[in-house]
Amino acid sequence: MECRPALPLRTELLNVLDQQIEMLTKKTFASFTNEEMRAFKNREQRIRELQDELELASARSGQSSDPGVFAAVYH
C-alpha cells in the first residue's frame, strides 16, 4: 500500500518536474533570461529536497523507495 504521508510530497515533486520539463521544452532553441534561470535553479533545489523528504518518509514507514529516473540528474 502507498505511504499516505508521502502523497503530497510526490504530488509536489511531479508538479515541479512538470514545470522543469515545460520550461526546457519552451527554451529548446532560446536562452534563459536571468529570472528564468533563477527559477529553474530554485526548482532543481526543490526537486532535490523533495527527493530527500520522500526517501525519509519511506524509511520511516519501512517501505523501500525507488529514487526514480530523475535521481541521477538531480543528485
Image (cartoon, helix red, strand yellow):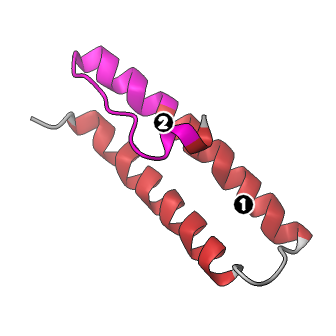
The kind of residue tagged 1 is Phe
Q: In this view, does 62 lie above or below 33?
A: above
Secondary structure beneath dot 1 equals: helix
Residue at left offset 25%, top offset 22%: 64
The image quadrant of residue 38 is bottom right
| Contact flag, marks 2 and 1 (Cβ < 8 Å) | no
The kind of residue tagged 2 is Gln
Residue at left offset 59%, top offset 64%: 20
Residue pointed to by mark 1: 40
Left or right, 56 with reference to 33: left
**Is 18 or 11 nearer to us in this picture?**
18
Check the image and name the residue furthest to the left.
1
Q: Residue 51 carries which label?
A: 2
Q: Give the range drawn in magenta.
A: 52-72
Q: In this view, does 15 lie above or below 70?
A: below
Dot 1 crowding, Cα within 10 Å, few <14, some 14–19, many 20+ = some
Q: Distance between the residues labelled 2 and 1?
A: 17 Å
